[in-house]
Image (tube, grey):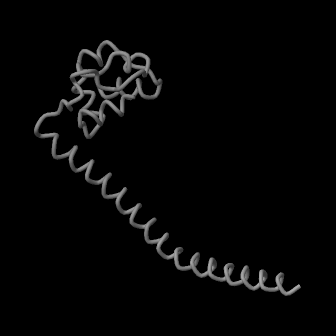
Amino acid sequence: MLDQIKDYYGFRTDSEFAAHLGVKPQVLSNWKSRKTFDAELVYNKCKKLNPAWLLCQEGSMIGGQHAVQEVSEGRMPYLLKKEINTLEKQLAYLQGTYKAIEKSKDFFLKVIQEIEQDLESKKKLLKKS
């Protein structure tokens, strides 16, 4: 959960995120290892979070009208680069899958033709008997 918040706000390191929260990096590290955190402090520092998500993991992470990202202009290129990287990976995976399907297509067409020929010859044999 803390990593999701960190990513949403565009912090590159835990130290940056801890500074934003006003805690020492060791405190943030302890929260992560214990899987707990000061929800009130996090909510007060990250106002756009949905309190239901923060407390119960219900609903979306960002509440209501605040669905637009709260990031400084300096962090926007980082977030865009991250999204571009994710999209490039997805595109490469899909292109690879498509190529594999294209290669398999010829094989399947050949097998289908062989089965159709075998089927026709068996039907002819059946008619002769």
Could you say which is closer to the camera, residue 36 or residue 69? 69
Left or right of residue 29: residue 107: right
Residue 59: image x %, image y %?
A: 39, 23
The residue positioned 22% from the left and 26% from the top of the image is 20
The residue positioned 63% from the left and 79% from the top of the image is 111
To which quarter of the image does residue 38 belong? top left
- Tell me the quarter of the image containing the N terminus: top left
Could you say which is closer to the camera, residue 110 or residue 28? 110
Left or right of residue 89: residue 56: right
Could you say which is closer to the camera, residue 107 or residue 89? 107
Task: Look at the picture and state if 64 lies above or below 118.
Answer: above
Could you say which is closer to the camera, residue 15 or residue 104? 104
Task: Look at the picture and state if 88 lies above or below 107.
Answer: above
The residue positioned 39% from the left and 66% from the top of the image is 95
The residue positioned 27% from the left and 34% from the top of the image is 8
Left or right of residue 9: residue 118: right
Residue 68: image x %, image y %?
A: 20, 30
Left or right of residue 45: residue 56: right
Furthest-top residue in this view: 40
